[in-house]
Image (spheres, helix red, strand yellow):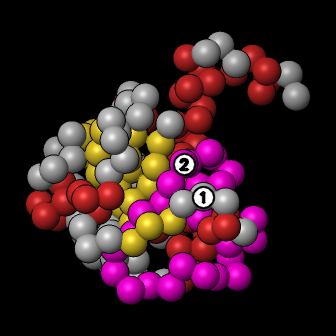
Amino acid sequence: MFALGLDNPTNPVNVGHVLRAADAYGAVMVALTGNCKVKSSTDTSRAAFRIPVIRGKCLHDCIPYNCVPVAVELIEGAVDLRKFVHPHNAFYVFGSEGATLGRRVTSWCKHVVYVPTRICMNLSACVNVVCYDRVLKQMVQEGEVSLLMNR
């Protein structure tokens, strides 16, 4: 089980794409802080009507019970996503399009990971990469990767 947290997103288009990714990869909840609109034409699967979307003042207060907070941030000391072992129950926290999470968020996260790219990624693209990495690694763990290769 996993959930997604968006720290002060600024672009409703990205929020819509994140909701679509949450739906596609099986997230159980999306939490966000700030005033960005949730409704967007990019939520083509209408995930906002099926997945709980909550808004809070601080994402720390939105962590689902028994979930491990994982900050996704391109900072020194973060673990390369390719080497990261995802917690069974995770709450992935992503920063806004133009800002970093900083110590304000990373201080309460058990893990900090980064996506190895030459430049920082768009918020929704980063969410998709992390969710895909999680799903793929779970399939490897469960021996289902051969199913993908035979399609």
Left or right of 10 on screen, residue 24: right
Residue 110 visible here = yes
Identify the residue shown where x is 40% and y is 77%: 9
Q: Give 110 or 100, whichever is nearer the viewer.
A: 110
* Residue 14, horizontal then vertical, whole percent: 54, 75
Q: Give 42 or 123, whichever is nearer the viewer.
A: 42
* Residue 77, horizontal then vertical, whole percent: 17, 44
Identify the residue shown where x is 77% and y is 27%: 148
Earlier residue among tags 1 and 2: 2
Q: Magenta segment range?
A: 19-45
Q: Residues within 10 Å of mark 1 (few under 14, many from 20)?
A: some
What residue would you read off at disc 1? 51
Identify the residue shown where x is 59% and y is 35%: 135
Q: Give 23 or 114, whichever is nearer the viewer.
A: 23
Label 1 sits on a secondary structure element that is loop
Check disc 2 and give the amino acid type.
Val
Which quadrant of the structure image shows residue 86? Answer: top left
How far apart are the two marked residues, 1 and 2, measured between alpha carbons?
A: 6 Å
Which quadrant of the structure image shows residue 73? Answer: bottom left
* Residue 61, horizontal then vertical, whole percent: 25, 59
Check disc 1 and give the amino acid type.
Ile
Left or right of 101 on screen, residue 45: right
What residue would you read off at disc 2? 28
